[in-house]
Image (cartoon, rainbow, N blue to C red):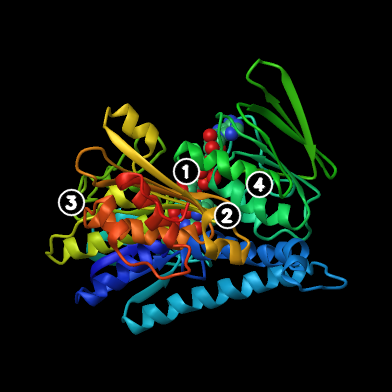
Amino acid sequence: MQYDVVVIGSGPGGYVSAIRCAQLGLKTAIIEKYSTFGGTCLNVGCIPSKALLDSSEHYLNAEKHFKEHGIELKDLKVNFKQMVSRKNEVVAQTTAGITFLMKKNKITTYEGVGSFVDKNTIKITKKDGSSEEISSKNVIIATGSKPSSLPSIKVDKKRIITSTEALSLTEIPKNLILIGGGVIGLELGSVYARLGAKVTVLEYLDSIIPTMDKGLGKELQKSLKNIGFEFLLSHKVTGATVKGKKVTVTAEDSKGNEVVVEGDYCLVAVGRIAYTEGLGLDKIGIELEERGKKIPVDEHLETPVKGVFAIGDVVKGAMLAHKAEEEGVYVAELIAGQKPHVNYNLIPGVVYTWPEVASVGATEDQLKKDGKKYKSGSYPFKASARARASMDTEGFVKVLADAETDEILGIHIIGPRAADLIAEAVVAMEFRASAEDIARICHAHPTYSEATKEAALAATANRAINI
Ligand code: FAD
Ligand code: NAD
């Protein structure tokens, strides 16, 4: 078979790219090694984690907050098997949706491992060992990433686990140890803390979610402590052992003292690594980058081999589903002769804890480092009537704007529905709005979004109204 484009990998980068290619009239095929489409995100990432986050949040509310709302429950308990089974159902429906979209867009699908024979020929090796070859003018590599670990730790996938196993446990851990206070650790740690686990976070740096604006990590730490998290920051993990059902993790604190933490499960969440196994990149002369083992690409996401592109987690940049999707569309449009653009400065980052955390643009630390003069306006959710009505008063919105021009440089939110609130910030910044622009736009009352308007008012001229 001869195609215009063959996409290897069906995660959010690959499947979105295939659809855009087909929309643009390119004869397109997609290869996925697993039997379901959707990659990490749909099968063992974004979607299952959010399903469990929502279920566990319902439980926590029923247990801790319903009474204050005047709702009394008797015999409340968790049916964890049902919780995991609902999560599996959400995943099944979502991945089936991608199968539908492939058919709808007349994209040819292949199940098997795709590997390069040469730059225009891809061999597909199926589960039963049989194989076939297809050719294409262009190839888009979208093979994603897998969990990474530490040299001193052996992940046995039973007691010392990665996010993949943490999404399908058969029991609620009693004492969950998290190595890494980043996004995966805090999201999945939240699931189990809400269901009753004691969660201990061992984080190498001196703050959690260290790449986000510092104030967010501090505020989130306070909220998570209230649901059973303990934080051991500035701790370097040195090893982990399993004996029966007990995991023992050793670490060194900032003074060099040994710290020992025991639990029944240990989730290793210290980042992810690009996945290129079995692709046969050596056949076309592509060498991986030293750092992160990523596939090298130029500003057009083309590898050193003409006509071979790479997108998503397997290339440089944030490992996020929406970043992979943008790149998928970019490459499809580029191949079709258009002049697309991805604004890498405005890719929002979200942590789906409760309160949620969301950010776009520069952090205060970055602005200070760049010597940029800026002004800052914040508004706490405890001053928001909407937040009081729903009892979600933790957190704040912070707007950072250029000291002279008032152009918004960054917006950082921790609070209810921050993941959705950040969209306003992204739109405003895409249109290079000033803080005063947001301050002058009518926001519906009562909504959480009023907090963004108030923070913008505070940044513009220190004139927030409802505080
Ligand atoms: P992937 O989704 O990893 O897909 C790659 C696909 O390629 C896989 O299906 C793989 O089987 C296939 N493949 C690999 N090699 C071959 C081959 N040789 N032949 C055929 N197929 C192959 N991001 C967010 O933006 N929001 C979130 O809320 C979020 N939550 C997450 C939660 C967890 C627990 C995890 C682990 C990740 C989360 N992420 C989230 C990150 C997100 O999942 C990734 O950034 C995203 O999936 C990357 O998309 P991708 O298309 O590059 O690769
Ligand atoms: P991460 O990079 O977010 O966090 C890893 C954390 O581990 C960091 O805080 C780091 O300082 C710490 N760490 C590293 N080495 C350590 C050590 N030796 N001891 C103790 N701590 C150590 O990585 P992650 O949480 O594994 O997530 C992986 C990727 O998946 C991220 O790039 C993220 O973007 C993506 N993801 C996104 C979402 C979302 O968008 N909501 C959710 C889950 C995952």
Image coordinates for residue 79, horizontal then vertical, percent:
79, 69
Q: Nearer the viewer, mark 4 or mark 1?
A: 4
| Earlier sequence position, callout 4 versus callout 1 | 4
Res 224 label: 4
- Residue type for callout 4: Leu
Q: CA distance from mark 3 to mark 2?
A: 46 Å
- In the picture provided, is 141 more to the left or to the right than 398? left
Q: Which residue is mark 3?
A: 306
Asked if the residue under mark 3 is in contact with the one under mark 4, i.e. CB atoms within 8 Å, the reply is no
* Gap between marks 4 and 1 measured at Cα: 27 Å
- Name the residue carrying label 1: 273
Q: Amino acid at mark 3?
A: Lys
Q: Which mark is residue 433?
A: none
Q: Along the horizontal axis of the image, is 404 left or right of 190? A: left
- As helix, strand or loop, the secondary structure at mark 2 comes to loop
Quadrant containing the N terminus in the rendered view = bottom left
